[in-house]
């Protein structure tokens, strides 16, 4: 698979990953290398990565606790302090090995430490391969509100090696798949059609699909790096999806929903809203709902909870001038941005999901 060069970052795949990083380490003369992991990627991914790395520069490992609940500014303070104590300077490199929590948080730590040091992302979940590590969005949550603090800035390299997926739990595989389904829905009907039998997907046929997803994301981000326009389409399903994710995160009696699981619900709701406001065909909306619920199951959201979830929409980063902006679909591959949606249509969308 050919490497993909973007404006100031190169994405390498499979066998190309390690010769490329070794060449980069050789060329750039970093003073120290720091590797950020959580306890799972420390155990499952770091040993393999270290075997492949050839450098004389000293390497320090920094481990943080896994999970979205730790994607906070407090964790960043801990990592900044550790970098300081271990004498990191402006010529240091941070390598983030992990899922979206590690690449988002590690990217933010790198972009802000001493006003910015170089970093590399080694995504180890499906979600971080096809989405979180591409496009330069970094950041952390603010309380239960997702991704409120952050900057957009690219890593030097992204290394996508699907070998790491062998140890990834199934529910996290499904969560990552949600973003690939989104790429099909917003961008490319041919790509979407490759996902019509989700039960047949396996690690063997995922490599080529991951590559296609990365190209879709890269093409969108390249045209609009700062989300003034086209990049907003990547938020399809995320307006309500993030609100649902935040609501579940903040409700002690609810099981936490994985990012992709919440986005799947958000996409079903946004598809329904699209039938009402953007002319999206109703039978296709029903098909999408059935396909998603068969594979992901249905999450119970009580009628009494709709208002609290809708209240969280006001924190969506795409809002401006107090308006909540939805991405809708006119057809598969034809998104429409900046759509305003009345509360009663959102309520109906929840009912459509529940029915
Ligand atoms: P995650 O980073 O929490 O990883 C999921 C779990 O898998 C964790 O427990 C982790 O320790 C474990 N894990 C990671 N790799 C493993 C491996 N190879 N083997 C075994 N276990 C492994 O979650 P995620 O789903 O990767 O990412 C979710 C985050 O990504 C969210 O915070 C979301 O906001 C963010 N995100 C960012 C962007 C972006 O553009 N920056 C896009 C989408 C999502």
Image (cartoon, grey):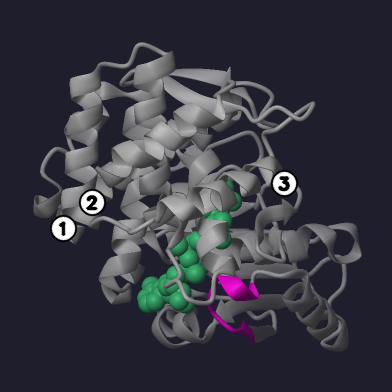
Q: Would residue 12 be seen by someone viewing this image from the given angle?
A: yes
Provide the residue designation for mark 2. 206
In percent of width and height, residue 140 lies at 69, 61
Residue at mark 1 to residue at mark 3: CA–CA distance: 33 Å
Res. 233 in view: no
- Distance (Cα) linking label 1 and label 2: 6 Å
**Quarter of the image containing the N terminus?**
top left
- The quadrant of the image that shows the C terminus is top left
Label 3 belongs to which residue?
153
Determine whether label 2 and label 3 are within 8 Å by CB: no
Can you give x and y, in whole percent of width and height, for residue 160 in the image?
Answer: 42, 56
- The residue drawn where x is 49% and y is 29% is 344
Asked if residue 162 lies left or right of residue 3, the reply is left
Q: Is mark 1 within 8 Å of ligand 1?
A: no
Residue positioned 78% across, 82% down in the render:
78
Q: Residue 48 location, x and y as percent?
A: 40, 80
Which residue does the numbered mark 1 point to in the structure image? 202
Which residue is more in the foreground, 79 or 182? 182
- Which residues fall within the magenta stretch? 63-70
Q: Secondary structure at mark 3?
A: loop
Left or right: where 187 falls relative to 151: left
Task: Give x and y (percent) for residue 36.
Answer: 62, 76
Query: Are the two marked residues, 1 and 2, in contact with CB atoms closer than 8 angstroms?
Result: yes
Q: Is residue 339 above or below residue 322?
A: above
What mark, if any, has residue 123 been given in the picture? none
Q: Residues within 10 Å of mark 1 (few under 14, many from 20)?
A: few
Front one among 99 and 249: 249
């Amino acid at each position: 698979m050919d490497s993909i060069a973007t404006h100031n970052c190169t994405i390498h795949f499979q066998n190309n990953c390690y010769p490329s990083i070794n060449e980069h380490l050789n060329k750039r003369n970093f003073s120290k290398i720091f590797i950020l992991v959580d306890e799972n990627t420390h155990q499952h991914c770091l040993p393999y990565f270290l075997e492949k790395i050839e450098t004389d520069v000293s390497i320090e490992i920094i481990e943080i606790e896994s999970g979205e609940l730790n994607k906070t500014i407090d964790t960043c303070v801990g990592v900044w302090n550790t970098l300081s104590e271990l004498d990191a300077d402006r010529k240091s490199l941070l390598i983030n090995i992990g899922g979206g929590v590690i690449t988002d948080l590690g990217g933010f730590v790198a972009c802000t430490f001493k006003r910015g040091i170089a970093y590399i992302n080694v995504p180890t979940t499906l979600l971080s391969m096809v989405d979180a590590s591409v496009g330069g969005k970094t950041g952390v949550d603010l309380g239960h509100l997702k991704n409120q603090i952050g900057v957009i800035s690219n890593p030097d390299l992204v290394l996508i090696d699907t070998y790491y997926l062998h140890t990834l739990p199934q529910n996290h595989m499904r969560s990552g798949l949600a973003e690939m389904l989104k790429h099909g829905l917003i961008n490319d009907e041919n790509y979407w059609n490759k996902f019509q039998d989700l039960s047949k997907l396996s690690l063997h046929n995922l490599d080529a699909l991951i590559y296609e997803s990365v190209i879709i994301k890269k093409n969108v981000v390249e045209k609009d790096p700062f989300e003034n326009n086209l990049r907003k389409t990547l938020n399809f399903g995320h307006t309500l999806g993030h609100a649902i994710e935040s609501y579940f995160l903040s409700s002690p009696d609810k099981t936490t929903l994985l990012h992709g699981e919440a986005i799947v619900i958000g996409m079903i709701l946004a598809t329904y809203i699209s039938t009402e406001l953007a002319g999206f065909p109703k039978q296709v909306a029903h098909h999408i709902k059935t396909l998603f619920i068969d594979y992901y199951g249905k999450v119970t959201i009580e009628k009494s909870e709709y208002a609290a979830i809708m209240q969280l929409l006001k924190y969506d980063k795409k809002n401006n001038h107090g308006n909540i902006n939805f991405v809708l679909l006119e057809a598969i591959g034809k998104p429409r941005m900046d759509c305003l949606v009345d509360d009663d249509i959102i309520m109906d969308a929840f009912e459509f999901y529940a029915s």
